[in-house]
Amino acid sequence: MANKGRHNYDRYNRGSYSGSRYIYSGNAVTRKKKRGKTILIVSVVLVFLLSAAFAAFYMLNGMSLFFKGESEIGSSETTINTFIDSSEIKHISFNGEKYESRSESGESYMISYPLTNIKTIDSQIAEKVKYFEKCAVSSDARFTSYDYTTEIADNTYLSVIFRSAEYNDNKEKFGEDVFTMAFNLKKGSSLKNEDVFKKDFYSFASEYVRKYFKNNLDTKANVDNETFVSATTADELHFDQFSFNDKQCTLYFNEKKLFASGTKIYDVSISLPKIADYLKISLSGAESEKSDTSGDPYISPTIRDNLNPDKPMIALTFDDGPHYSNTERILNTLENYGSRATFFVIGQNAAAYPEILKEISDAGCQIGNHSNDHVNLTEQSDKKIKEQASLVDEAVKKATGSETTAFRPPYGSYNEKVQKILNKTPLIFWDVDTEDWELRDKKKVIDSVMKQAGDGEIILLHDIYDSTAEAAEEFIPKLIQKGYQLVTVEELLYYKNIEVNGGETYPW
């Protein structure tokens, strides 16, 4: 009976269990004299039978007080009870995910992991899963979940990012951590830091990461902390959790290790061209754009070099499209006047009109992410937030070859959780709300734009309305006549010398 279930029941129901144990002690210790042996034997047998009955009852029924839902064990059909609703912890496979997901479960943990069908890689992942199981069993947490994401670079290098979450007796998450693994798919081998990065990478990474946290509103007050300084020195051990894809390398940091307290995981992304000189492996995403990386920071190829930083600029932004006719109408007007804008697209519309996404991209305009179906992200689970963003990126990448480069939360609604999850691109809001969504009148929209326009402003519009497309044909040339350069958000932030970090908000 000394199994984990019995141990857990003892831990959470000390009153009744210890009561039974006290009665056992009483029978075994205090009644020694008259008919000692007989009474002792009978008492022991009775207590043993009662204990067995109680244990069987609680194993079959009592655990359901603490464990709800079902989860998989490997690929079998076996189901067990889990501590929290399995929908909150079970891996969700997104569209386009390359690998089959497997899971291992116990009374105090659930671990999801990918199956690559490459024997040498899967065996190493299996070893890591065993390590996670041992950690979960020995942890003080009531329940620990491990989930993962994967990234691939050049169809050759696989990164697996495991994230753990620890829950207490009240099903409250109180701890998080991150663990990464990297592999060469063609060789079936693992990749360590020394296989990926040159020695001078760590000096670069130290400086980059310190600058990142210094510019982060939540952490800048703590960057002089001795713990932080020590944890970000140019040492391989401080940068051993990493991943990379075709666009960027991401370094992962545990808040507690950086600042001596806290449970957050920080993802610090660096574009591949910035680290091209520090890589031992060859990545096309670094080499193909290396010639464009003069100066610091890296200048995106979509940023025009013929703009005049001394002249006023405005960034027009259009939400909720693409629209089957209005978006093209706006694009034609922009092109006629040598101008660009940013389009924050909805996933459902993006998937429906891939050819229009391609037209936006070919026109040199910026494509931003506005979620898959315009939900309030502050009301969604972590996985739903990720899904809302990833579905859009998949549609845009399929149509244009590149993912979105900015995110605008629906309704302008965000919180710290949203910032933390959507931390690979900046969160873009607006200076001017034209209220075209309410006005629905060409003349009123034109007046709204012209009265509120100013240098350095981001203007909110919607390309799903005919009245907005009609108004754009008039206010775009009017703005040009007033001396404004019409630019993308990316261009505006660059030429206004505003440093941009993923997960941070602009202009708010």
Image: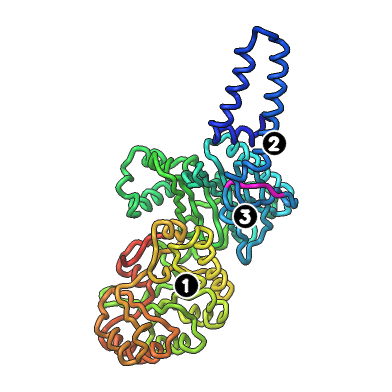
Q: Is residue 354 left or right of residue 488?
A: right
Secondary structure that dominates the magenta span: strand
In this picture, which residue range is highlighted in magenta? 79-83
Residue carrying label 1: 374
Q: Earlier in the sequence, mark 1 or mark 2?
A: 2
Q: Quadrant of residue 391?
A: bottom right
Residue of label 3 = 158
Q: Magenta stretch containing residue 80, yes or no? A: yes
Q: Residue at x 57, y 59 (%)?
A: 283
Label 2 element class: helix
User: Which mark is nearer the camera, 2 or 3?
Assistant: 2
Which dot marks residue 89? none
Q: Earlier in the sequence, mark 2 or mark 3?
A: 2
Helix, strand or loop at label 1? It is loop
Q: Work out whether mark 1 precedes mark 3 in sequence or the reverse, and give the earlier one.
A: 3
In reply to whether residue 387 is colored magenta, the answer given is: no
Mark yes or no: residue 201 visible: no
Image colouring: rainbow
Q: Could one spot residue 94 in this view of the protein?
A: yes
